[in-house]
Structures are given as structure tokens and as C-alpha cells.
Image: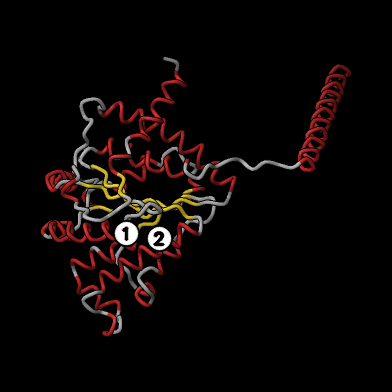
Amino acid sequence: MKKNEAAKKMELRAADLITPYRIERGKGFRLKNYATANNVSSTLDKDKAEDLLKECSKKLSSLQERLHAEGRWSLLLILQGMDASGKDGAIKNVMSGVDPQGVDVTSFKAPAGAELEHDFLWRCSLAMPRRGRIGIFNRSYYEEVVAVRVYPHYLDSQRLPEKVVGKQIWDERLSDIAAYEDYLARSGIIVRKIFLNISPEEQKKRLLARIEDPDKMWKFSPDDLRDRQRWPDFMAAYDAAIGATASKRAPWFVVPADDKPYARLVVAGIAIDALESMNLAFPTVDAGKAKAAKAAAAQLAAETSKGNNSSKALNKRTQDDRARK
């Protein structure tokens, strides 16, 4: 098989991988129905997954160039998941071949300062990708209906009027998010939401690896264990969040994350599929601009020719001067 034919096969395979994980209707959604391990491990080993990811990175780079040139659409990838689910690694590896000038990555921590003086969507709105760019959120406004739901005392720091903090606040926030994502889609911001679905057993291995590696220990936080102890509560919160906000315009993808290379490959496939859905193309120029461009090319060619002649004359004078000496 020729090299470019193999590459084409790889790209198609990577894109095909996303279909089983796509959720456009959330009714009856439950995370327990989705595996944390990939279902093609026997046919897709680590080396092959990494080779496929390299090909996907090339494809992403090409699509990102068109996205920038056209300058009409933008893509927002939202990555959610429990600690150690691989969000940082997915961003680093999937976007490794893309022009960094065209990608904005925002990592959202617990809100503080001015962020607490605004509505819960405000800080994410400020970070939305401009037209022609890819934006990646490492965590997002979904923390406001997941982490804050698991630890409702966080609401106290948001200084909301007591009247609006009722039993329906989570359903109301989820409704606001769904409407907000419809608004983004109608504004030309394509939204794709990714939940990296890791098992408690795999998370345990990764947390221990962090603690035992001096170069990675800084990543560990006691909060990781606190959240781990509330695992069922987090899963229930994600069930509600994904179920209420999955739509055709802004689908969720529940990606098996126990296998890092495979998870990264699927994330790459999601990004490629989203960009291809925009039918991106390089801008075309009218006859007037084309004529002006050809005239400029002729002028530049003449300058080059003149420069070469001047260089040759200078070299001849130098040689004559040396000969006279």
C-alpha cells in the first residue's frame, strides 16, 4: 500500500472511531452504560494508535489552516473528566502538530475575585475562541453543575440572592447551558464536549504514579482523594449534566479513557469531524486581485533579476580590482 493511501485509511479510521461515543439525545443517559476501556484493543495496539494520531495531527493542521484562512467559523472543544483522566495529555498530544497561533487553551480552576462577581458563564464567555481559531477548555462551566452540585457550599462564595438558590437551581443552570450552547452554535462556534471516562481502578494507578514520581508529584492534590471518595456523586452529577445538554448542535462524546493512546486518538477524530463539518475552503480571489497579484509577481521577478545582475557586476569589479593589485 502506498504511503498516502495508508495515511488516508488512517484518517478515515480515526474519524470512524467517534461514532459509538457520540451522544445527541440525553434522555435516559447513564455513564454506567459506557465502558472505560476501548473495545478494539485486540486490533489497535499502542504503536498503531500513536501512528494514527500522528496522521490525525497532520490532518488537523491542514484543517486549522483553512479555518484561519476562511475566518468565519470557530471550534470549541470542552474536556471534562475526573482527576487523572488525561485532559492535559489529550490537549498536548492531539494539538502537537497544529500551529499554536491558531489554538487557545484555557484551564479553569475554582472561580475567584472578579469571577465570583459575575454570572457563572461570564468567565467562559470571555475565553470563547475568535473566528478562525480553535478554543480548548480544560474544565468549563460544567463544573458549576458538577463540582458545585457535589459540594453545594461553593454556592455561598458566589453571593447569589437567596431567592434564586432553590431546589431547581441545577435544572435551571442546565437549561441555561443548553440554551447558551444553542446560541454559540448559531453564532458560528461549533461546540464539541468530551467526557474522558476513566475507571476508579485506572485513576488509582495514575494517582499513585504521580505520587511516586518526583517530577510528577506536583500534579497531586489532596482534593483528588476527596473527590475520589465522592465518585458516585460525581457520576450522578455528570449523568444529569450530559443528559440535559446533549444535542445535535452540541453533542457529548463519552470517550473510554483507561487507554491513553486510544483516548487521544478518539479526541483527535472528534476535532477532525467537527472541522470537516464546516466545509472549510481557502478564500478565492476575484479577477481584479488575481491580475494585481500577477503584476506584483512580475515586478518581484524583475527585482530579482536586477539584483542578480547587480551582484554579478559587483563581483566582476571586485575581481578586476584584485587583478590590478
Amino acid residing under circle 2: Glu
Q: CA distance from mark 1 to mark 2?
A: 8 Å
- In this rendered view, identify the residue nearer to me: 324 or 168: 168
Amino acid residing under circle 1: Thr
Left or right: where 250 falls relative to 61: left
- Measured from the top left, where is residue 69 in percent x and y? 59, 45
Left or right: where 215 falls relative to 93: left
- In this rendered view, identify the residue nearer to me: 314 or 124: 124
**Residue at image x 20%, y 45%?**
34
Q: Is residue 132 above or below residue 55?
A: below
The reply to whether residue 222 is in sight is: no
Helix or strand or loop: what does disc 1 sit on? helix
- Measured from the top left, where is residue 116 in percent x and y? 34, 75
Q: Quadrant of the C terminus?
A: top right
Label 1, on which residue? 245
- In this rendered view, identify the residue nearer to me: 175 or 102: 175
**Residue at image x 41%, y 53%?**
249
> Residue 165 shows which numbered tag?
none
The reply to whether residue 267 is in sight is: yes
Q: Quadrant of the N terminus?
A: top left
Helix or strand or loop: what does disc 2 sit on? helix
Callout 2 environment at 10 Å: few (<14), some (14 to 19), or many (20+)?
many
Colour mapping used in the image = secondary structure
Q: Is residue 245 above or below residue 192?
A: below
Label 2, on which residue? 181
Tags 1 and 2 in contact by the CB under 8 Å rule? Answer: yes
- Measured from the top left, where is residue 40 in percent x and y? 23, 30
**Residue at image x 33%, y 63%?**
141
Q: Which of pointers 1 and 2 lies earlier in the amino acid sequence?
A: 2
Q: For the view shown, which residue lies furthest in the top direction?
A: 1
